Amino acid sequence: MAGLHFSLRPSSSFPTSHPNPLSSQNFLSRLILLLVLLPLSLAIFSFFLQWRSGSGDPTTIWSPELREFPGKQSSSVLGRDKMSAGCATDVLGQRSSPTFPYHRDWKFNYNASNLRPKICITTSTSAGLEQVLPWIFYHKVIGIANFFLFVEGKAASLGVSEVLEGIPGVKVIYRTRELEKQQSESRIWNETWLSGFFYKPCNYELFVKQTLNMEMAIVMARDAGMEWIIHLDTDELVHPAGTLEYSVRELLSDIPTNVDMVVFPNYEGSVERDNIKEPFSEVSMFKKNYDHLSREAYFGHYTEATRENPNYFLTYGNGKSAARIQDHLRPNGAHRWHNYMKIPNEMRLDEAAILHYTYSKYSDLTTRRDRCGCKPTKKDVKRCFMLEFDRDAFIIASIATEQEMLRWYQDHVVWMDKALKQKLLKNGILTRIYTPMVIIQGLRESGVFSSVIASARAALSAVNLSSAGVIKSSSIAVSRREQVFSRKMGDSQEFHATARKMLEVEKLESHSPAVPPLYPPSMVDFSDAEMVTLLRKASFFDP
């Protein structure tokens, strides 16, 4: 054992057990370099793909060129045909974007018996396809089954009406001499509650037409098996807030059976630019109705919200309504319904509203002016317009230069003061609503509007080429449309004498006058003491 010798010093032929600091640092450096280079390489590869494809969004590289409505069978005719009517080409065109996932095809058939209640909308319009198509299909998405369109002007032109007639659930009624004769013999025309609006131009004439058309639409709705009817203009959208499915069917299905009429307070579109082209797709800010605000908040910010205009809203503020279809139903002007045998039981909605896109385009100043033949004086415009802002806008559009008119529009309509917008948004006077915008943009991007236009054109071409007899019947239809006109109420002395003879007969019962477009409440509607109290309370809400 004495010969054995153990050494605690490690032999040079074996590696040491201590780590080498230089090796660890080299490993970490390589790892960090790899983590940096990997995402950088992916970014460069992505940029290369975008450059090769010419697309701004790599997610669209692999998308097919032909985009159809989800679930719809491929159709070379509808998908590739780019034909459209007038200015609808750009506005209603198909875009390369994700498709809209709500419905299976653009026909939106609502014939299933389980889709209740059945709701229809009636309107009187002269608008083109760029406005009417988004309006129709938006309301189809939220549950409207049928539409009764009383058309004249551009809406009654051959290119537009052929498209509208091809949409399932849409009935087009033309303003012909026969229609006006029929309406001149109707019950409404021979009663006194609407007579205060007769024989006046512009807005008064439109108000009478709308009411007479509503009277006819009630009969059509009953024949079609509808349960509710709503009157809207084509610059208005129903906003069924407060429902889980964003559905007007869900909204009205929850209404108690003893309620005859539902009132939708209206919100007014508040534009933020003077170059709006597609209001439904570009306007997201709205001024809330008095009915959906506390009195303290409303009057506490009344002056700021009015911005030196005649009233809180530019135009009407008394909303629109839906009526349950039942015996003895009648319209009561364009904003309300009534019943010959009873006072309707009315319910006002707490969340749902009508979105009114009024004066959303700068061109609205001149188009409204061109529809009326009144003199641009303070006295004469009262014959044409019921609301003060409409009168002011007509005078400006008639006498001002283009530059002065644009400046007036910017000062009185466009919300350009960012600080004021933020303040009123914070205090609930203004609100943002995006859902209608998203729905309509989705419909457009899915090719729904271009498809319905292409389908109508294809159907018209097939009819014209089928046989000589069909061509002849088509020519008769065109001739009928050429008879469409807009008679000024009271221009014909014979029409005047015949239609109004019943007013000389004493009525057994009187009816209150029709409800016209009305402004929301103003400061003058309350006493000084009430206003002082309200403003004091409002000071606590507005720091």
Image (cartoon, rainbow, N blue to C red):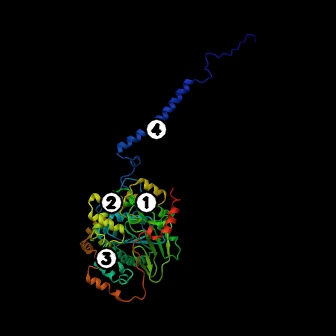
Which label was assigned to residue 304?
1
First-in-chain label (1 vs 4): 4
Q: Position of residue 321 (x, y in %)?
A: 44, 72
Q: CA distance from mark 1 to mark 2?
A: 17 Å
Q: CA distance from mark 2 to mark 4?
A: 53 Å
Of tags 2 and 3, the one toward the viewer is 2
First-in-chain label (3 vs 4): 4
Does 153 sit above or below residue 7? below
Q: Residues within 10 Å of mark 3 (few under 14, many from 20)?
A: some
Asked which quadrant contains residue 46, the reply is top left
Circles 1 and 4, Cβ within 8 Å, touching? The answer is: no
Res. 190 in view: yes
Q: Identify the residue position indicated by label 2 in the image.
A: 408
The kind of residue tagged 4 is: Pro
Q: Identify the residue position indicated by label 4 in the image.
A: 39
Circles 3 and 4, Cβ within 8 Å, touching? The answer is: no
Q: Position of residue 480 (x, y in %)?
A: 26, 75
The kind of residue tagged 2 is: Trp
Q: Residue furthest top?
A: 3
Of tags 1 and 4, the one toward the viewer is 1
Circles 1 and 3, Cβ within 8 Å, touching? The answer is: no
Q: CA distance from mark 1 to mark 3?
A: 34 Å
First-in-chain label (2 vs 4): 4
The kind of residue tagged 3 is: Lys
The kind of residue tagged 1 is: Glu
Give me the residue at 43% from left, 37% from top. Answer: 41
Q: CA distance from mark 3 to mark 4?
A: 71 Å
